[in-house]
Image (tube, grey):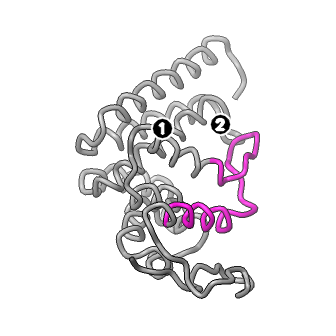
Amino acid sequence: MRSMSQSLLLPGESPNLFAAECVAVTSFSVVVTAADFAARAHRGQTRKGRSRRPYIEHVLAVTSTLSMHGIDDPVTLAAALLHDTIEDCGLTRDGLAAVFGDRIADVVLEVSDDPRLSLHTRRLLQVHEAPGLSREARLVKLADKINNVREVAIDPGEGWDDARRRDYVTWSQQVVAAMPPTHAALERLFATECTATLTVIGARERAGAPG
């Protein structure tokens, strides 16, 4: 059983945050530690939706989607909790590896966009790279897309008109279609969420609702 040291600390945090010199890692504790780490990494961040929900709610929803569909692999669940820490929190693959090990860090890196690239390029890369993702990364990607598409229906980003919402769903379908078969139930749920969201958008368009 490996251990994690004071590298659990994020920049600016007191070295007294963890009283023990190290945290023992079991399958359960690594997931709990990842949840704690993600909550601190995303502190103060909100989702793009109009409700401005705390960002941590999203990563918990992604992880819950996996757990409720029988995924109990700690690498996948920890990566789900941490999946936006490189992209949105300025952390690095090596920094995560120092805390959680290479496998978890590599999965997080697989599902991370490079924020220095344009949105168009990032979207093209997600489709291009989808066939080569590890199974763990595909599971995280599926759960992330399920929750993102659901949010597009009920809590879209500020300024997102119906055309942009529809475009997001269409692109998400392209990403998932490019991945090898991964988990039938999650793939069915993704398809269901896409249909539901497109139905909502279509109803709004027919009603002439403002964006």
| Mark before the other along the chain sequence, 1 or 2 | 1
Decide which of 122, 62 is in the foreground and name it: 62
Other residues around mark 1 within 10 Å, as few (<14) / some (14–19) / many (≥20): many
Quarter of the image where one finds residue 203: top right
Q: Give the image location of residue 7, x and y in percent.
A: 56, 84
Q: Amino acid at mark 1?
A: Ile
Residue drawn at the location 54% of the way across and 65% of the way down: 34
Q: Amino acid at mark 2?
A: Pro
**Which of the image's four quarters has the C terminus?**
top right
What element does badge 1 sit on? helix
Cβ atoms at labels 1 and 2 below 8 Å apart: no
Question: Is residue 132 covered in magenta?
Answer: no
Looking at the rendering, the stretch of residues picked out in magenta corresponds to: 30-57
What element does badge 2 sit on? loop
Per the image, the residue denoted by label 1 is 146
**Which of the image's four quarters has the N terminus?**
bottom left
207 sits left or right of 96 in the view: right
Question: Is residue 36 covered in magenta?
Answer: yes
Decide which of 110, 102 is in the foreground and name it: 102
Per the image, the residue denoted by label 2 is 156
Q: How many marks?
A: 2
Quarter of the image where one finds residue 191: top left
Q: Give the image location of residue 66, x and y in percent.
A: 44, 44
